[in-house]
Image (cartoon, rainbow, N blue to C red):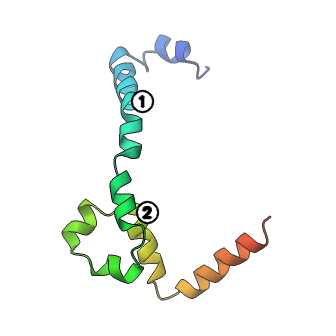
Amino acid sequence: MGWSRAALWDQGRFDMKHFTLAMLLIASLPTLLWADEDAVKKYRNFTPEQIKALPESELHKSVPMMYSLAARTGLAIDSNLLFAMELNRLMYPG
């Protein structure tokens, strides 16, 4: 039993509905990836404290997830340990 497209098609696991859905997702992927470019530029220089001070509605609607997660990590109780571990990993790879 292989995982090739023909094998999946023959076994009935890969029908036209799934193929069409996959093609639509692949076609919309660039739009999904670059949709928040303006938001990335807007919030790029915000500090973790500034992001935390934003209203909850704005935080969920317009702040990119990478910034909200980074702010949460930066404001965590054990953030000094985390930063030291990441710096150590960068300085001594492998």
Judging by the rendered image, the residue that carries numbered circle 2 is 66
User: Could you tell me how many numbered marks the image carries?
Assistant: 2
Residue 64 in view: no
Give the residue drawn at x 79%, y 72%.
Answer: 92
Give the residue drawn at x 34%, y 46%.
Answer: 35
Please name the amino acid that badge 2 sits on: Met
Please name the amino acid that badge 1 sits on: Ile
First along the sequence among labels 1 and 2: 1
Q: Nearer the viewer, residue 45 or 30?
A: 45
**53, above or below 45, in the image:** below
Quarter that holds the C terminus = bottom right
Residue 9 at what x, y percent from top left? 47, 14
Judged left or right of residue 69, residue 81 is right
Quadrant of residue 38 within the rendered picture: bottom left
**21, above or below 48, in the image:** above
Residue 42 at what x, y percent from top left? 34, 64
Q: Which of 31 and 23 is in front in this view?
A: 31
Judging by the rendered image, the residue that carries numbered circle 1 is 26
Mark 1 burial class by Cα count in 10 Å: few <14, some 14-19, many 20+: few
**23, above or below 67, in the image:** above
Quadrant of residue 61 within the rendered picture: bottom left
Give the residue drawn at x 72%, y 77%.
Answer: 88
